[in-house]
């Protein structure tokens, strides 16, 4: 089990197949990812100034990619915080379980691709920050 701190949330450089007609990034289970994929979703048409996230997950791990445009992700493990800016299609931020995240500063036309370790489960969310701190034993 991976430690549930912001120091275990790293930006991975994803494989890029380049030719003169452009780039392809392919993500294969067990090869390119720190967990197996069970769900993929993407967030788009984000109005200027809006924030997303504002929750933690008990079990879910995610890899977050700015496939277009840019945005910032602030990570919080109940003890430390850090902000990561994503602005390239070949970078992926791995967020381990038990991390509070806020997404902000979306550029116009940004698309946030999320690769997830589990299918959607509303009971995996912690949406109250005080409850999150309790969950972390703080
Ligand atoms: P939420 O995860 O809160 O969005 P964000 O973290 O981007 O702010 O999800 C927003 C809504 O969409 C919420 O009502 C749950 C629903 N939803 C699904 O039904 N399936 C999913 O896979 C996801 C990610 C969200």
Image (cartoon, rainbow, N blue to C red):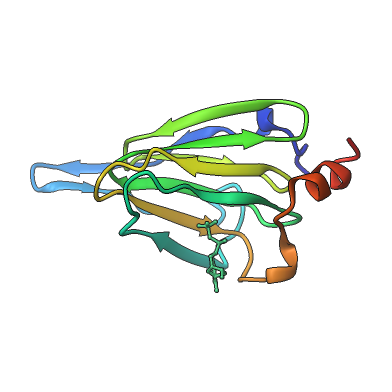
Q: Which residue lies most toward the front here? A: 49
Q: Is residue 64 left or right of residue 112?
A: right
Q: Position of residue 121 (x, y in %)?
A: 67, 71
Q: Above or below — where is 105 with respect to 30?
A: above
Question: As rendered, which of 138 and 90 lies closer to the eye?
Answer: 138
Q: Above or below — where is 85 with respect to 15?
A: above
Displayed quadrant of residue 38: bottom right
Q: Position of residue 94 (x, y in %)?
A: 56, 42
- Tell me what residue is drawn at x 14 percent, y 43 percent: 19
Question: As rendered, which of 129 and 29 lies closer to the eye?
Answer: 129
Q: Position of residue 55 (x, y in %)?
A: 65, 51
Q: Is residue 82 left or right of residue 5?
A: left
Q: Above or below — where is 10 with respect to 110?
A: above
Q: Is residue 38 left or right of residue 68?
A: right
Residue 18 appears in view = yes
Q: Is residue 34 left or right of residue 42?
A: right
Q: Quadrant of ligand 1?
A: bottom right
Question: As rendered, which of 63 and 137 lies closer to the eye?
Answer: 137
Displayed quadrant of residue 42: bottom left
Q: Position of residue 68 (x, y in %)?
A: 28, 47
**Mark count:** 0
- Tell me what residue is drawn at x 30 percent, y 48 percent: 110
- Tell me what residue is drawn at x 77 percent, y 28 percent: 79
Question: As rendered, which of 79 and 87 lies closer to the eye?
Answer: 79
Residue 27 appears in view = no
């Amino acid at each position: 089990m991976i430690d549930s701190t912001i120091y275990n949330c790293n930006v991975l450089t994803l494989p890029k197949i380049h030719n003169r007609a452009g780039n392809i990034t392919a993500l294969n289970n067990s090869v390119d990812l720190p967990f197996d994929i069970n769900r993929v979703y993407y967030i788009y048409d984000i109005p200027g100034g809006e924030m997303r996230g504002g929750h933690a997950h008990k079990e879910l791990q995610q890899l977050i990619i700015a496939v277009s445009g840019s945005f910032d992700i602030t990570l919080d493990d109940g003890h430390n915080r850090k902000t990561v800016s994503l602005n390239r299609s070949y970078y992926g931020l791995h967020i381990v379980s038990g991390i509070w995240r806020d997404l902000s500063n979306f550029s116009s036309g940004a698309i946030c691709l999320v690769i997830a370790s589990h299918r959607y489960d509303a009971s995996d969310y912690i949406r109250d920050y005080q409850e999150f701190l309790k969950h972390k034993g703080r």
